[in-house]
Image (tube, grey):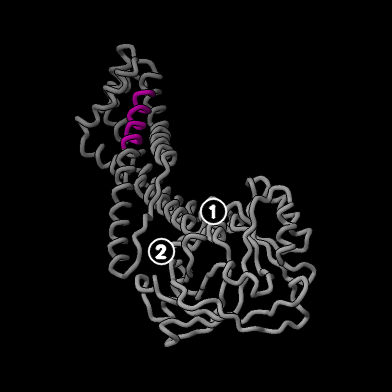
């Protein structure tokens, strides 16, 4: 029997058993739609989270710090780290206690001040909610949302506010500029009326970033952290080992990303299991439909065998019919999963906007996954049709003709 004839005979179910066929396809499509909805939600949450905390630069960056007196992260040490094979750039950070005033001293607060170079933000994977990061052409201050809240300002009004900053910093000694055993503390004025040019997303921790250039020659150049950019991913471990051998404590954002990916993979598997349970239920319904179709078409099978249809022809007829139901259920399920996801995402964004949040895309559907679940649905259809197909192929034609 030709494949075209198999398709034509199998598609008769839409003419003679339309309601039952549509309900069976609907059952499969709801299950596939559930799988697509849940798993794409997991993919979307993963992509949204990682896009907020990482950039391509940050994934090639190691964080090095010193927890002992064996090595001090001064400029000499930084220059030495640049000689490690694979290291292409280093951006240090100094953290010092300070006092920040706003509005001509009307409001002031003590907080930690971070002094960094302009490439520090890119290597850290930071992004601004509004405004920009400072550079040589655009000097200024970058603050977190928590700072704006501390001074009673919102996201829009914090930009262009003028800050006065004083640092409590170790005094430079004569000679090498290293820290003494018990350093004296100076109150170092950084500048008055420094404009806020950027706001980062952090509502929990008050953070203020200013350029290292503004304290050059005023403060002992000893850093608490260095962002070390590596040339390629395959060199991360070698550079990490070299840094550890020098007595530094090393961490990497890529480690956090790997852990997050493992957690999200487990989360997606759990969500997929719930969807597969629904698919199993729909597969039982599909099996029942095919079994009933076998009983209803017993005489027809007998006639077809009597006029020369082979066992494989009869078996293929049922397999094509069940796979067609599975395929159509998969396609319709993808449509249902997509539309339900878009509707849910729209509702969440409307709710978020009314509560002052940002719009996000909670769903992500990789093409390979969409194609896979359609194929999976078709395979489930074939599997549920195997048993009825084998029974139909073994039917005795004379007994089938007499069957009522």
The reply, left or right, for residue 181 in relation to residue 2 is: right
Judging by the rendered image, the residue that carries numbered circle 1 is 261
Residue 402 visible somewhere in the drawing: no
Whether 164 is drawn above or below 83: the answer is: below
Q: Residue at x 75, y 59 (%)?
A: 244
The reply, left or right, for residue 116 in relation to residue 388 is: right
Q: Nearer the viewer, residue 349 or 218?
A: 218
Q: Residue at x 26, y 22 (%)?
A: 8
Which element type, helix, strand or loop, lies under badge 2?
Answer: strand
Q: Locate the N terminus and report the quarter of the image it occupies.
A: top left
Residue 133 is a magenta residue: no
- Separation of disc 2 and disc 1 at Cα? 30 Å
Whether 363 is drawn above or below 133: the answer is: above
Predominant SS of the magenta segment = helix
Q: Nearer the viewer, residue 377 or 348?
A: 348
Other residues around mark 1 within 10 Å, as few (<14) / some (14–19) / many (≥20): some
Q: Position of residue 390 (x, y in %)?
A: 41, 27
Q: Nearer the viewer, residue 235 or 45?
A: 235
Judging by the rendered image, the residue that carries numbered circle 2 is 131
Q: Position of residue 114 (x, y in %)?
A: 57, 71
* Mark in the foreground, 2 or 1: 2
Residue extent of the magenta highlight: 316-328
Q: Position of residue 391 (x, y in %)?
A: 39, 28
């Amino acid at each position: 029997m030709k494949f075209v004839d198999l398709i034509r005979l199998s598609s008769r179910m839409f003419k003679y058993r339309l309601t039952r066929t549509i309900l069976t396809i609907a059952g499969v499509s709801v299950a596939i739609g559930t799988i697509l909805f849940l798993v794409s939600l997991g993919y979307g949450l993963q992509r949204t989270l990682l896009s907020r905390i990482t950039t391509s630069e940050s994934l090639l960056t190691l964080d090095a710090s010193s927890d002992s007196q064996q090595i001090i992260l001064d400029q000499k040490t930084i220059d030495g780290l640049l000689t490690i094979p694979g290291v292409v750039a280093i951006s240090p950070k100094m953290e010092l206690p300070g006092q920040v005033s706003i509005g001509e001293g009307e409001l002031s607060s003590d907080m930690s001040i971070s002094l960094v170079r302009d490439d520090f933000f890119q290597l850290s994977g930071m992004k601004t909610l509004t405004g920009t990061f400072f550079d040589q052409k655009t000097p200024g201050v970058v603050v977190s949302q928590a700072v704006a809240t501390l001074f009673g300002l919102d996201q829009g009004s914090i930009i262009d506010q003028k800050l006065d900053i004083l640092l409590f910093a170790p005094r430079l000694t004569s000679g090498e500029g290293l820290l003494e055993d018990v350093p004296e503390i100076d109150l170092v004025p950084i500048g008055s009326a420094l404009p806020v040019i950027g706001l980062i997303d952090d509502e929990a921790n008050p953070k203020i970033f200013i350029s290292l250039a503004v304290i050059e020659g005023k403060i002992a150049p000893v850093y608490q952290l260095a962002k070390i950019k590596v040339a390629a991913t395959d060199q991360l471990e070698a550079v990490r080992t070299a840094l550890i051998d020098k007595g530094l404590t090393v961490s990497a954002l890529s480690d956090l990303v790997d852990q997050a990916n493992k957690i999200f993979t487990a989360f997606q598997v759990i969500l997929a299991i719930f969807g597969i349970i629904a698919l199993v239920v729909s597969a039982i319904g599909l099996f029942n439909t095919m079994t009933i179709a076998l009983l209803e078409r017993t005489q027809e099978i007998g006639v077809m065998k009597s006029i020369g249809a082979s066992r494989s022809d009869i078996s293929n007829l049922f397999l094509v019919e069940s796979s067609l139901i599975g395929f159509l259920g998969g396609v319709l399920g993808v449509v249902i999963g997509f539309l339900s996801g878009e509707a849910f995402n729209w509702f969440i964004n409307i709710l978020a906007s009314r509560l002052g949040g940002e719009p996000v895309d909670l769903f992500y559907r990789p093409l390979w996954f969409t194609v896979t679940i359609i194929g999976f649905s078709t395979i489930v259809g074939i599997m549920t049709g195997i048993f009825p197909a084998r029974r139909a192929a073994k039917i005795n034609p004379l007994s089938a003709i007499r069957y009522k």
